[in-house]
Every structure is written in C-alpha cells, then in structure tokens.
Amino acid sequence: MTASESKGIKVAIVGGGVCGLTCAVALLRRGIHVEVFEAAAQFGEIGAGVGIGPNATRLLEHLGVLEEVLKETLEPGLTMGPFLFLSGMEGHEMLYEYPERDHGLGAHRPSFLNAMVKFVDPSITHFNKRCTSVAPSASNPGRTMIHFADGTTHEADVVIGADGIKSSVRPYVAGDDASRVIFSNTICYRGLIPMATVRAAGVTLDFSQSRTSILLGVDRHIVVFPVRGGNLVNVVAFHADHNAPLGSPQLPRDEWVKPVSQQELLDVYAGWGPEVTGLLNCIKTPSKWSIHMVYPPLESYVKGNVALIGDAAHGMLPHMGAGAGQGMEDGYILAQLLAHPQTSNTSLESVLRAYDRVRRPRAQMVWNGSYNTGKIYDGKGEHGLNADGVKQDIGTRWDDVWHHEVDDDVTLAVAWLKEISAC
Ligand SMILES: Cc1cc2nc3c(=O)[nH]c(=O)nc-3n(C[C@H](O)[C@H](O)[C@H](O)COP(=O)(O)OP(=O)(O)OC[C@H]3O[C@@H](n4cnc5c(N)ncnc54)[C@H](O)[C@@H]3O)c2cc1C
C-alpha cells in the first residue's frame, strides 16, 4: 500500500473525456483511490484531430504514457512542427511561419483516448452514470454526494467535475443559477479526410507535413493538420460573427452539434482560393459545431471538496489549440497535490484551493489568448491581414502556453499550503 492509499482519500471523477482520464491516470500513478463515472456507455471521442502542445506532451511524458499515445495514434514522435499561416484567397500567399523551437503532437482523438484508457483499471470505471448534481453529504460531513440520472448516488472525499462544457458539477461550484456557458458567435465545420482523397482532388498544398496550416480570411479561417501518421487530414473551418454581443443568440442544446449539407459549407467559403474549395469539396458530410465557452469566468474552480477541471472549468475558443492541454494540466496538478505526502483528509479543502490558485490565472490567460487569436485569424487584428500584420499580431503568442513546466506550479501550490500551515 502506498502512502496515499493508507490515507484513505477517495476521489470520484465525473466524466471520462481527455481531461478526466488524464486526471485518473495521474491519480492512479500516485496510488490514489479513484473512480470514474461516465455518462456514455463507453469511453469515446469524436472522429477528429486534436493538437497537443509541448506543455501537454511533456506532461504525458511525466506520466509515462507518451510512448503508448504515440503508438496508438500512429505518430512517429513529437514531430508536429511550426504553424504556417497562409492566405485563404487565390494564390494562397504565405503570410507567416511561427518560429517554433519545441514540437507537439497532432493526434487522432479516438486513438489518443484509447491510449489513455489502457492505463485506467476497468474495475474503477462506471458507465451509463450521468451525474445530475452534487451536494454535501447529509450523513458524512466533509464528503460529497454525487447524484446520477438512474437514481443512484456515490459518496467521495473529493469530487472532480470533468464533465465538459455542459457540466452538471459546475452549478454547485459556481454557486449561482446562471449556466456560465454562452455561444461564442463562432461556428465551425469539421471533417476528417483520407490524405489520398485530398491528393486525388488535386489539392497541391502539402498537408502531409507534420505541421498545422492555417488559412486566413475575413471572419473565417481554416485549420488543417495531418493525423494517424499522415493518413488522414483534420480540417476545421471556422466562421465567426465578431459584431454580435457574446451570448446572442442562445441556441438550444440539441443544436450545438449537427450534420449539415456540403453545400452549406461551400457557400460559407464561396470566393476563397482553389486549394480551399478543393479541400472542402472532399468533406462530403460535414458536422457543424456551435462553439460555446464558459463565460463570465468562474471566480473559483473549487468549492469545499469539489473541483472542476477541463472544459467544465474553462471551456474556451479553440484558436490556440490549447483547451484540452489546459484541462490536462488541471488534472495532472490536482493529482500531484492530492498525492502529496502531507495531504490528508483534513487538508483537502486547502489543497483544492491551492489547485485553484495556480490553475485559474493560467487557464484564464489561455482563454483570453484563444479569444484574441481568433480575432487575428479573422482579419480583426491590429495590424491587418497581410504578411507584416499577421507577423506582428501573432508574434510568439504560444510561448507562454507551450513553454511552461507544470511541476513548477505544483511547487508553487505546495509553498502556499506551507505558508498557510496546511501542509
Ligand atoms: C473545433 C474544436 C477544436 C479543438 N481543438 C483543440 C486542439 O487542437 N487542442 C486542444 O488542446 N483543445 C482543442 N479543443 C478543445 C478540446 O476539445 C476540449 O478542451 C477538450 O476536449 C475538453 O475535454 P474535457 O475532458 O474537459 O471534456 P469532454 O471532452 O467534453 O469530456 C467530457 C466527458 O464527460 C462526459 N459527461 C458529460 N456530462 C456528464 C455527466 N453529467 N455525467 C457524467 N459524465 C458526463 C462526456 O460523455 C465526456 O466523456 C478543440 C475544441 C473544438 C470545439
């Protein structure tokens, strides 16, 4: 039995997406008792790509899972190179190449999740468990009760809400009735195309290289990168209304993601260059996402012994490709703090507050960065949509996101706990 197990801390994670599973793996690695409650009948991810920045890939390395992730995603290594910014219009002028010094990973989401699942003991996972609410336990002070849609409950010392943007745990932590989720006035069309299809369509831009190409235009941009070892091309085509006030209109939840016709997608990009038209022509059945985000930001990611991680805490626009990475940082840091030798059942609330202290400012920094980056992509940057302007506006804006060591945050949090004599 490890030191942590002997303390008898029992953790429950609500939601087994990328962030919930990263947290579960991090806790298991440190010998903490954890159970995962997932609403779906099995773990699963949408058929799309996800960019995992150098900050998050380092964390996977710390957890000892990177090798399996590379194997499962069919990636030859951390080869995802610089971002290339191109005009979306005819001629597709090269606007800027991001001066990257570290590499990340462009991963096929389901394969990435499959790799993480391998490190989670099936005996601690519970499917078809849709959380409806959490509340302090009536019979055991200090513990929290999770209520599920099937009428069952589960009690734990620490509850971690990793249940995504529509979180059912967030209302308890936020302490208000407002959902804190708004429509970002941005929609995107997603597609995953075989590389061979793209080539056969006569697209000449080389999307097979391990790098992300971002095609820019007014109020629209398209992100393209290869996954599955270059066999598939991940395409996300955005369209934003930058004039509408945030949160208007309010969309019914069942309309957040829906299949649309290819014609709708082609109409949105009418007038763009031939490479774009050729690429979008390959997406026969696009799905349309109305992107929502957590706003206004939460005043805290924790309440008592309940913590939020991932999109439940800070769902953001995806324009820096960093939302999942931030949620993975949440899960990793929270796990290290719960596993700290001086953490005990009596210090859990302070430990969660320490997590909030280090994570909230950083995640909000990335949230703000993602919001502003979207404006630059869509021609709303200060210096305009041309090579000089894009270079000035984009600059080195990923530096703070990518070149950050999560273990330093753990050290900071522990120092604070010592300062308040909680550890
Ligand atoms: C178009 C687009 C592109 C993106 N690209 C990137 C990128 O390149 N890089 C990046 O880092 N991020 C990217 N993101 C953001 C990233 O997808 C999210 O930040 C990340 O998936 C959030 O993970 P999560 O585990 O917090 O939530 P989710 O992935 O939403 O997982 C939540 C889990 O909880 C379960 N669940 C939900 N409700 C309940 C409930 N009530 N009870 C129990 N279980 C429940 C769900 O079934 C699911 O398994 C992108 C987002 C979008 C929309």
Image (spheres, rainbow, N blue to C red):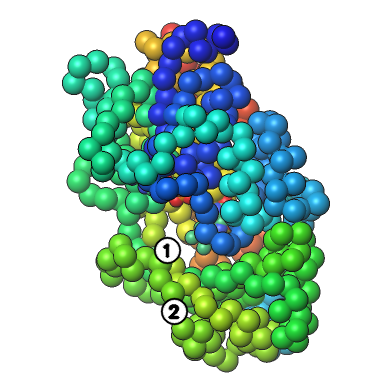
On the image, the x and y values in percent for residue 219 come to 50, 77
- Badge 2 density bin: few <14, some 14–19, many ≥20, Cα 10 Å: some
The amino acid beneath tag 2 is Val
Reply above or below: 163 against 290: above
Spatial CA distance of label 1 from label 2 is 15 Å
**Can residue 420 be spotted in the picture?**
no
**Can residue 41 be spotted in the picture?**
yes
Q: Are marks 1 and 2 in contact (CB under 8 Å)?
A: no
Using the image, tell me which numbered label, if any, was put on residue 291.
1
Reply above or below: 342 against 145: above
The numbered mark, 1 or 2, whose residue comes first in the sequence reads 2
Q: Nearer the viewer, residue 300 or 197?
A: 197
Q: Is mark 1 within 8 Å of ligand 1?
A: yes
On the image, the x and y values in percent for residue 370 come to 52, 57
The answer to which image quadrant residue 65 occupies is: top right
**Secondary structure category for the residue under label 1:** strand
Report the residue at 63% width, 52% height from top: 111
List the residue tagged with mark 2: 260
The amino acid beneath tag 1 is Ile
